[in-house]
Every structure is written in C-alpha cells, then in structure tokens.
Amino acid sequence: MTDILRDLPSLRGRIARWRANGKTVGVVPTMGALHQGHLSLALAAKAACDRVIVTIFVNPTQFNNPDDLKKYPRTEEADAALLASIGVDVVFAPPVEVVYPPGFATTVSVSGVSGPLEGTHRPGHFEGVATVVAKLFGMTTPDKAFFGQKDWQQLAVIRRMTADLNIPVQIVPCETLRDPDGLALSSRNARLSPEARAKAPVLYRAMTRAARAVAGGEPAAAALKAASAEVLAGGFSAIDYLDLCDADTLEPVSDTRRPARLLAAAWLDGVRLIDNIPAG
C-alpha cells in the first residue's frame, strides 16, 4: 500500500521505523504530472533500496515565470495511483507552508554549473531547485536520490550542491526515456497540440546528427549551425540555446576530446522543450 503523507512528523516517524529495522531509503523528487520517465526513476529506486519515497511538490521558487507556475499540471490523484501500481512505499506531498514556513529566509546558490544555459534564460531557477532539493534531502534523509539525465544541468547542480554541503546522499543518474520517435518524455509534452507533437522529434534528430558530425571531426560551430537551421525549418519558433559543453563543468567546448554533452532548449507551439545527448 502506498501512503500519502503531508506533514514532517508523520514522514520522519515512518522513516525512523524503517531505519530501526535496518532498511535503506531511496527518494525520487518530482513535481508531479508523472509519466513513464518518473516511474522508471521510482523503479530504479525500488531495485536499489528497501524503501522508496516519491515526493510531489510543485516548487514555486524555481519558476521565474508566474504563468508557468499557474499552468503546471496538478494531477496528484492520478500520480498516486501510478506510484501505487509499482509499489512505492510513500508519497510525500507537502503543502507549500510545510516546505516554506512563515519566516523562511534561506536559499542555496550553486555557482559555476548553474550559470550558463538554463541559468542565463531562467534567472533564479537553480537557486529554487537547489534550495528545495536540499530541503527535501533534509526531510527524507535518504541513502540514495534518483534523478533523470534529461535535466542534465539540474543534475550537475544537485551533484555540486550535495558534494559541497557534505550531504550524505548518493546521487543516482538515470537514463532519459524517449518515445519511439525520439522525443524525450516530459510533463510539458502534454501541452503540445497534435500538430506540434508531430514536429517535436526534429529537435532530437538534429541534435543526434550534430553530435555525430562533431564526433566525426566536423567543426562544432558548423555542426551546431546546421542543427539550429534544421530545428527552425522543422517548425520550432525559437532556440534559446543549442550548445556543445563539457559534460562536467558545462563550459562551452569546440571538440569532444573530453566528455562532452550537446544541450538544447527550443520553443514549439508556445512550449519550451529541453533535451541533451552525449557527444563524442
């Protein structure tokens, strides 16, 4: 049975009983609107840990656009049913006042990896992410935490924060799940019209071609220019970035002598899609 807990004393009491019985704990932080990508994280947690908590919290501090916060889907009942179907032990779905009580005045800021890409286009976003994840780690006290690689920069920020603050949690990255046509699974995909959904895979196809071109020796600038042109010709209205970066530091690179990642964010049908793939 999957229990839904909303307050900290109930959560901590449950975890204390698990710990008293020698159980390990895994956590999967989410904002709800769950899809198969989220379920794959929960299944990975179940395979690696004795007990699994999935958190559902639409975090207001990571939205720099209030309209995005309002539009973000809230589907807790359906989410809980999905998690129950795979045997998740606890859903922790706290109200805002539990996470950010009156007088809350602390933020976590991670420099370096948070600066480029999303950091440029969504000011303050990663402060909100780092703060809420640090709080969720403090609330759930897990042994391991599971994150998807689709949000590569977010994963880098969380890894850096966890290491810098000596938080005793192992960060477990999990592969991006994709539809058969290559589109990365995302809660935002549900906002695409049928026509836009048919166009969406061009982003992944263009990125894949660019990554192969760079690995084959083509100058990165030329490969990225061609990929950008393909994405726009395929129906996307704008590209926030399509960059080749060092996989660890996220600094721009021009070749793949070190592990590199191709990262993109682009607009389609008023929806901002992000993706990334290894390069080289």
Image (tube, rainbow, N blue to C red):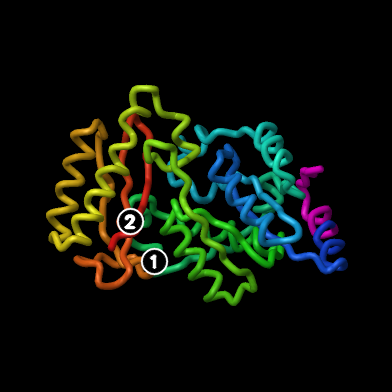
Instruction: Give neighbour class at mark 1: few <14, some 14-19, many 20+ (Cα, 10 Å).
Output: many
In this rendering, the answer to whether 13 lies above or below 268 is below
Residue 113 placement: quadrant:
bottom left
* Front one among 47 and 100: 47
Q: What residue type is labelled 2?
A: Leu
In this rendering, the answer to whether 196 lies above or below 33 is above
Residue 80 placement: quadrant:
top right
Q: Is residue 8 magenta?
A: yes
Write down the region rendered in magenta. Answer: 1-13
Apparent side of residue 265 relative to residue 174 in the rendered image (left or right): left
Q: Where is residue 200 in the image (x, y as percent from the top left)?
A: 33, 34
* Quarter of the figure that contains the N terminus: top right
Question: Which residue matches tag 1?
Answer: 113
Q: Is residue 117 magenta?
A: no
* Quarter of the figure that contains the C terminus: bottom left
User: In the image, which disc is placed on residue 117?
Assistant: 2
- Which residue corresponds to the image point at 58% horizontal and 58% vertical from the top-left? 146
- Which residue corresponds to the image point at 38% horizontal and 69% vertical from the top-left? 248
- Which residue corresponds to the image point at 27% horizontal and 48% vertical from the top-left? 207
Q: Position of residue 172 (x, y in %)?
A: 56, 63
- Which residue corresponds to the image point at 73% horizontal and 40% vertical from the top-left? 84
